[in-house]
Amino acid sequence: MFELFLPMLERLGIIVTVAFIITRFRFFRELIDRKSLHPGQQMMAIAFFGLFGIIGTYTGITYDTSSLEFGRWAMDLVESEAIANSRVIGIVAAGLFGGYRIGIGAGLIAGIHRFSLGGFTGFACGISAVVAGVLAGFFHKKDKPLKLKTALLIGGLAEMVQMGIILAVSKPFSRAWELVQDIGLPMIVANGLGSALFLLIIRNVLNEEEKAGALQAQKALKLAESTVAYLRKGLTKDSSQKACQIIYDEVDVSAISMTDQEKILAHVGEADDHHRSGENIQTNATREVIQKGTMIVATHGDINCSHSDCPLGAAVIAPLKKRQEVVGTLKFYVRSEKEISNLLLELIQGLSALLGQQLEIAEAEKAQELAKEAEVKALQAQVNPHFLFNSLNVIVSLTRTEPDRARSLLIALSKFFRQNLGATTKTWTSLDEELKHVKAYLLIEETRFVDKLQVNYEIDPSALSVKVAPLTLQPLVENSIKHGIKDKEDDCKITIQVRDLGDRVRITVIDNGSGMTSERLASLGEKEVHSEKGTGLGLMNVNKRLVHMHGEKSKLHIESKPGEGTTISFVIPHKGKEVSA
């Protein structure tokens, strides 16, 4: 029995190779991400895992129950021979990752192959291969990550079931019993360890790629934040040139280019002597990206450069979208297609999406500038790009570890910006809608603070229908976070109170932050204050809107002392536009 342990463990080296290879296949990435496979991918998964089982059979060790001798490789068997193998690992992996359908399919392929090799256990091993697929499929959890302990137990359990089927089906029983005594324990241990090793290797490979992808996402966020000052002015020749230069300095490519729908706006890097800004788009691939709105990898021929000695051998072209409409492209040029890695593709895809967000922000800010003639409109729809990028960074980090939470944050972020952008067309909104906007904002901030922030709501339901100017409450809460509790290490608390006082409603935001001096307090909300902690512009804007829309008695009332937190409150009427008392 013990002389079989070492050869069986040696065979596990094959598992390392197969596990690495399988991470290259798209269908397996879909399985890992718990996505549904289309029929073609399912057939590919079944075929691959079935082949994995066949390899496990061929690399097994033959055992002759008559001579009690072990062979080196399993080929055609005589009646007295059986195989000590790792076939079950591929089948168990198929069931655990893909469920019943893929597990049974892989079991059928590997089982029929094993039956064709012969030997007195051929039929029993063929049946047990299918049973292993059913068993592993039972433990398939679509919404939960696989654990090493689960793979270890299922691999060993599947092999135990096989030993039971051999005893029940194979004849004569005495020969089957002798076989199970000699190879049973080594196969149970080796295949349990092999299943766990298979999962461990796949997990480590994917984790490394995820870390690299996270770094690329961080780089994309950093580049987007660095270019925000320029692209907020819109997609122009000047803003594109400066943005391309920033990206070119940070990304290891031959050249960076941006276009609008018709012309090259900027080209930085190699071949800038003949790829000039202001020229019409020459690349058919670029036109295709603008038409279809999808990223394309262009070869040297697709680039269609008129210079025969152009050093640019390939390009990745991604669309720049504003409100789902393609307004231009971002191009990464390299010397050859070999330089285009998956990480580079992820970087340009993420960066183009973020640059598109900047262009949307630029459009929103232009709309805000056009509304300056109406004072109320000029004080609404202020979008903070740093909040957007920080929020996206948090969502990126949660996408793999807590996808449900990441999805909730994306919904909250969408609601937040929809309210911000919608505020440009509204004069009034309900207090209920304002609170929903604040809650969406605080859901994101609470995640960023990682259990550091506690928010309490004390709301009188009867006050929720009261009309208020849009974007009145959220700037007050943002002020508490940015200037009140930002530097606290823990126990950060914000309380939002809405009290129905009959003919009036009092709204109060309380924080336990650092507070402020009496000198700063005296001017806050009345005028812009220049200091290291901020300008007070947000509070001033809110105060002006409250006075303009509700009357002088609705202006902000602020109480604060250094180290004792800050309380900001205001009152609005139940009906009408002026507070009566």
Image (cartoon, rainbow, N blue to C red):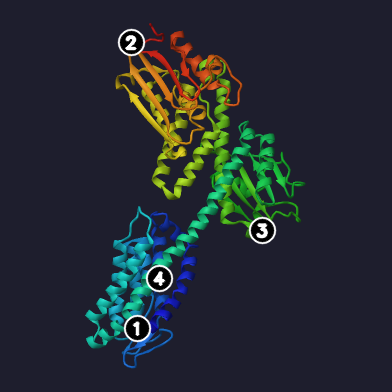
> Label 3: few (<14), some or many (≥20) within 10 Å?
some
Q: Nearer the viewer, mark 2 or mark 1?
A: 1
Q: Which is in the foreground here, disc 4 or disc 1?
A: 1
Per the image, label 4 sits on a secondary structure element best described as helix
Query: Considering only vertical position in the picture, is 273 above or below 562?
Result: below
Asked if 363 appears above or below 545 in the picture, the reply is below
Type of amino acid at the residue the image marks with label 1: Met
The answer to which of marks 3 and 1 sits earlier in the sequence is 1
Viewer-proximal residue among 495 and 213: 495
> Residues at badges 4 and 1 in contact (C-beta under 8 Å)?
no
What residue is drawn where x is 37% and y is 61%?
97
Q: CA distance from mark 3 to mark 4?
A: 40 Å
Residue under label 1, please give it. 1
> What is the residue that sits farthest to the bottom in this orientation?
67
Mark earlier in primary sequence (2, 3): 3
Q: Which residue is mark 2?
A: 503
Instruction: Specify which label sits upstream in the sequence, 2 or 4.
Output: 4
Say which label, 3 or 4, has the lower sequence index.
Answer: 4
